[in-house]
Image (cartoon, coloured by chain):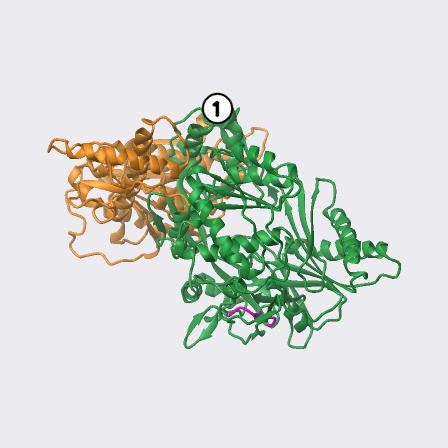
Chain colours: A green, B orange
């Protein structure tokens, strides 16, 4: 249900409630324009995502180009190839792991379903009861109804909990036959396949002008469709044929302060990686005693890394000794054993050179070095070090990353607000099994925003994530006090992972809990609290008009008019420059604010904080 | 048609006699047509009075049908559900060999239109009882005289069954202009058949409950078959007929008869097979060495050694070209014959010449176009 507001001619407020009664069938004007990525058996199906909402000045349609990946591989094909790859006893678990949660497209109708379960006890010869009460086997049903032959009689069936309503009744679970379902979307393996993603990007990563053209086609299509036009006319509505045009602002570029030096960056590119290399870091951690682990074949890469580190670290003020280099067999167990045997309380950091991006190896090493033997660690894939031209730049980034992990501080920007603590929170909810929620919590510990407190909270089902967050808040305030000898008078919380439907809970329930928590820290402790919800996956895109064409708006672009919501205190910031495609703006929604700061200042502060992400590339 | 829903309500009502059809009557009628299609395999089928296109949607799954047409007097009803007749994403992913075109027309069965000529089967399911007298009069001439398909199926209510239907006082549906008993329908049908040289047989769906067989089927059906094959060429008439219908919808399904889709399917299969052949070839070469490591870089290094040995052997081979895939330098060569022996490829292309023609320019081939080339390196990040 969507509510929009308007005014009658007499000035009376009118609230219109729009309820979804019917889904318009997909008319797919571009359906012939699919892209066949040969030999990956992938088809990219272009389409649009859209939403209609009330914005500051008017009701608008927000549309963006979206692509669906279709694969001509059926679930059955997939199960067979999986069977070849895993041991028999692990096959069912592997299927569950790979398939549950995946969206499939049925061969015989235009519907997609989410696979929620696999029923190994059933097969296509089982019968089911139809709406009219008769019983029929799946195999006969699909033959009769859709002329679809099912050849594998032993395959299990898939279960999908259909959440769609048909009329007034909830439709129960749907049974699907693996042979008749195509897989959609990309697998983890595909995402890791660099060449495939490159091919895909050619079709899916559109430049500003390409995007504008595609959206234009959608608008044209709507204008040409008689039914659409008639419907709109009956309501006295019509769509503008051009995109919304308005004026935005670009806030000034920041100065980067690093070890006594101050430098600017080109505001168009927002890249200061070269400048950073030649100035001492604010606080460099030494590499006195550290491990470098590699396999025999990667010896050259490991050596290259070491030599280049020697080259880049002096100018950044990092004191570095030669690492303890240890060669291992290329097996996960070998890495772990060496780490276990060689890490001492004096070890600053363990660096592992890996031969490939195999996730299981990486995961095992990281898990060991986070939970069993917690020390800072850095993994480097040998291939990234193979090109001599980029070696120096890459090693610089690695050195910076390593330094951060060891607790160093790289650079800062000028933050005019004093006694301010910034908190960052992100949540992940495991909806599939276990229903656990995990929150990551960080908080700044100094005014320069270069030192941070961090904690992870795991809450199981039944407990609330806010309890864990409160505990973090208390702990971090104690830490702050230890370092600064006073408590912050302002706290600004940036929160990711909150859907629109959860905003009310956040404001009405979680925020009061935070306020309560603050009171327990000190009598009369009354800091100003601001809570901002951050959304990185927005379908809104902005284009800058440049000499008749469109291009990406520069970093620092702030938009708080026209496309923001009237009932929210929200704004967009474009905080990066991209080489290909369209830049994705980030949406900020200030849901609670007692700071009395001007919106302009909140925006500028947010943009400044974007510069403090040390791990960009 | 909307009358079907009404019939459903009437027929589904519980009554002391308990008249309930399983499956529902409208479905039984459609399945009757489906069975006929499966038996006689018509290529061109038209449904007159197609309404919400449910029958057309069911028939599109019959692979023998190449042309499917619908006609109805009411455009709105057709437009509501006609999207169901568009090709599905699956039809683009894996186009089938059959070709299919679906068209919908708005118009009246009392008017002639050349678009309805040359059909193998014309269906009129629960249509005639909705026609005005003047329209009914013209109906036989238009359908049997002008359209003259090889087979016609007409279904209509059997009024003798109405005694078993509760709530039916005059007609089963307010839009019915008449409801015939068996004698009336058969008389009309036989007159029509005789006049236009068709034979007709009678049957029905919707069996009466035991003990009441004498009322006959709930729906009576006449199946008409042309006695003699068409002598005149359609279109060679005294004067050409003008179009009277309006085309409301048309969809051409992707098909392997369209070379564009055929080429896609062949190239896709070839590249997929090529990857499999390459992988098994490389695995085979490697397994000849003692230490097998699953790392690609390691494998590549080992491969280099084996390849260097192997290519030396290749040069000493006799002049006759081997058809086995082989590796030379950093490239895997797969002679084209390897693909043509794959049943699916053979089935798609028919001849080796056609296969070569289809893949030229779409896959990487060596200088004399006798083999497909692939990089021996693995494409991992």
Name the residue nearer the viewer: A546 or A67.
Answer: A546
Name the residue nearer the viewer: A75 or A27.
Answer: A75
Residue B37 seen: no
- Which residue is denoted by mark 1 in the rendering? A88
Locate residue A89, reporting x and y percent.
51, 23
- Image: magenta residue range: A554-561
Locate residue B357, reporting x and y percent.
18, 45
Name the residue nearer the viewer: A276 or A59.
Answer: A276
Q: Is residue A38 left or right of residue A169?
A: left
Is disc 1 surrounded by few (<14), some (14 to 19) or many (20+) residues within 10 Å? Answer: few
Which quarter of the image is occupied by the N terminus of chain A?
bottom right
Q: Is residue B354 left or right of residue B101?
A: left
Q: Is residue A117 above or below residue A169?
A: above
Locate residue A298, reporting x and y percent.
44, 41
Q: Examine the structure image and report whether residue A447 is included in the region drawn in magenta.
A: no
Q: How many marks?
A: 1
- The single residue placed furthest to the top in the displayed view is B211
The local secondary structure at tag 1 comes to helix
- The single residue placed furthest to the left in the displayed view is B319
Residue A377 seen: yes
Type of secondary structure dominating the magenta stretch: loop
Q: Is residue A266 left or right of residue B299?
A: right
Q: Chain of mark 1?
A: A
Give the quadrant of residue A241.
Answer: bottom left
Q: Is residue A99 left or right of residue A33?
A: right
Give the quadrant of residue B16.
Answer: top right
- The single residue placed furthest to the front in the displayed view is A321
Locate residue A77, reporting x and y percent.
40, 33
């Amino acid at each position: 249900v969507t509510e929009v507001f308007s005014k009658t001619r007499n000035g009376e407020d009118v609230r219109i409630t729009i309820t979804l009664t019917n889904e318009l069938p997909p008319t797919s004007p571009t359906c012939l324009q699919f892209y066949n990525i040969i030999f990956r058996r992938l088809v990219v199906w272009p389409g649009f995502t859209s939403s209609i909402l009330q914005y500051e000045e008017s009701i608008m349609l927000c549309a963006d180009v979206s692509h669906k990946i279709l694969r001509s591989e059926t679930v059955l094909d997939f199960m067979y190839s999986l069977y070849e790859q895993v041991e028999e006893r692990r096959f069912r678990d592997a299927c569950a792991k790979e398939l549950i949660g995946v969206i499939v497209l049925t061969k015989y109708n235009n519907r997609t379903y989410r696979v929620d379960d696999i029923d190994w006890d059933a097969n296509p010869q089982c019968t089911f009861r139809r709406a009219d009460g008769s019983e029929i086997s799946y195999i006969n049903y699909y033959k009769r109804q859709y002329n679809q032959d099912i050849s594998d009689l032993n395959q299990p069936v898939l279960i999908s909990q259909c959440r769609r309503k048909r009329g007034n009744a909830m439709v129960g679970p749907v049974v699907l036959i693996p042979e008749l379902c195509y897989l959609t979307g990309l697998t983890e393996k595909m995402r890791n396949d660099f060449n495939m993603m490159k091919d895909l990007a050619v079709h899916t990563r559109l430049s500003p002008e390409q995007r504008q053209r595609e959206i234009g086609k959608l608008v044209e299509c709507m204008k040409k469709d008689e039914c659409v036009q008639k419907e709109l006319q009956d309501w006295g509505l019509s769509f503008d044929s051009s995109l919304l045009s308005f004026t935005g602002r670009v806030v000034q570029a920041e100065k980067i302060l690093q070890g006594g030096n101050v430098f600017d960056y080109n505001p168009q590119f927002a890249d200061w990686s070269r400048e950073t290399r030649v100035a001492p870091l604010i606080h460099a951690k030494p590499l006195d005693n550290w491990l470098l682990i590699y396999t025999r074949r990667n010896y050259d890469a490991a050596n290259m890394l070491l030599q280049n580190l020697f080259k880049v670290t002096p100018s950044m003020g990092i004191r570095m000794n030669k690492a303890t280099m240890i060669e291992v067999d290329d097996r996960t167990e070998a890495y772990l054993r060496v780490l276990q045997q060689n890490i001492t309380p004096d070890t600053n950091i363990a660096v592992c050179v890996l031969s490939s991006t195999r996730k299981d190896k990486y995961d095992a090493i990281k898990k060991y070095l986070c939970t069993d033997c917690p020390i800072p660690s850095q993994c480097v894939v040998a291939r990234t070090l193979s090109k001599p031209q980029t070696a120096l730049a890459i090693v610089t980034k690695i050195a910076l990353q390593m330094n951060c992990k060891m607790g160093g501080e790289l650079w800062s920007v000028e933050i005019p607000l004093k006694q301010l603590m910034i908190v960052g929170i992100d949540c992940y909810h495991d909806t599939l099994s276990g229903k656990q929620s995990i929150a990551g919590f960080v908080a700044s510990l100094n005014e320069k925003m270069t030192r941070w407190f961090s904690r992870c909270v795991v809450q199981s089902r039944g407990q609330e994530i806010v309890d864990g967050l409160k505990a973090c808040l208390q702990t971090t305030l104690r830490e702050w006090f230890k370092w600064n000898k006073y408590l912050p008078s302002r706290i600004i919380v940036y929160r990711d992972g909150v859907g629109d439907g959860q905003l009310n809970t956040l404001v009405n329930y979680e925020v009061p809990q935070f306020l309560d928590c603050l009171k327990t820290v000190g009598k009369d402790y009354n800091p100003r609290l601001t809570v901002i919800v951050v959304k990185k996956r927005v379908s809104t895109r902005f284009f800058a008009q440049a000499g008749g064409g469109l291009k990406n708006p520069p970093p620092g672009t702030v938009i708080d008019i026209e496309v923001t919501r009237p009932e929210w205190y929200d704004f967009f910031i474009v905080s990066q420059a991209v080489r290909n495609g369209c830049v994705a703006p980030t949406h900020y929604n200030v849901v609670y604010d007692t700071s009395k700061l001007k919106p302009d200042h909140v925006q500028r502060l947010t943009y400044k904080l974007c510069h403090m992400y040390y791990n960009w590339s | 048609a909307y009358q079907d829903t009404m019939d459903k309500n009437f027929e589904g009502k519980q009554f002391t006699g308990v008249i309930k059809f399983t499956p529902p009557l409208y479905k039984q009628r459609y399945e009757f047509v489906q069975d006929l299609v499966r038996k006689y395999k018509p290529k061109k089928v038209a449904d007159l009075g197609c309404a919400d296109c449910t029958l057309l949607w069911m028939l599109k799954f019959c692979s023998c049908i190449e042309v499917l047409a619908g006609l109805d007097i009411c455009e709105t009803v057709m437009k509501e559900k006609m999207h169901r007749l568009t090709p599905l994403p699956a039809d683009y992913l894996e186009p089938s060999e059959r070709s299919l075109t679906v068209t919908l027309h708005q118009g009246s069965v009392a008017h002639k239109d050349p678009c309805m000529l040359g059909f193998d089967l014309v269906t009129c399911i629960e249509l005639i009882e909705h026609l005005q007298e003047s329209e009914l009069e013209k109906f036989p001439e238009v359908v049997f005289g002008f359209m003259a398909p090889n087979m016609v199926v007409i279904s209509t209510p059997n009024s003798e069954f109405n005694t078993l239907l509760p709530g039916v006082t005059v007609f089963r549906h307010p839009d019915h202009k008449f409801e015939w008993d068996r004698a009336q329908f058969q008389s009309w049908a036989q007159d029509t058949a005789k006049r236009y040289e068709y034979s007709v047989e009678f049957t029905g769906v919707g069996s009466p409950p035991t003990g009441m067989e004498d009322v006959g089927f709930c729906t009576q059906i006449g199946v008409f078959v042309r006695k003699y094959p068409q002598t005149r060429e359609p279109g060679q008439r005294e004067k050409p007929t003008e179009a009277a219908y309006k085309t409301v919808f048309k969809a051409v399904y992707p098909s392997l008869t369209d070379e564009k889709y055929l080429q896609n399917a062949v190239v896709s299969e070839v590249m997929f097979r090529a990857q499999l052949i390459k992988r098994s070839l490389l695995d085979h070469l490697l397994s000849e060495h003692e230490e097998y490591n699953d790392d690609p870089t390691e494998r590549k290094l080992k491969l280099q050694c084996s390849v260097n040995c192997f290519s030396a052997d290749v040069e000493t081979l006799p002049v006759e070209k081997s058809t086995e895939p082989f590796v030379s330098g950093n490239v895997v060569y797969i002679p084209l014959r390897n693909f043509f022996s794959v049943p699916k490829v053979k089935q798609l292309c028919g001849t080796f010449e056609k296969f070569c023609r289809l893949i030229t320019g779409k896959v990487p081939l060596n200088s004399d176009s006798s083999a497909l080339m692939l990089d021996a390196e693995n494409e991992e990040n």
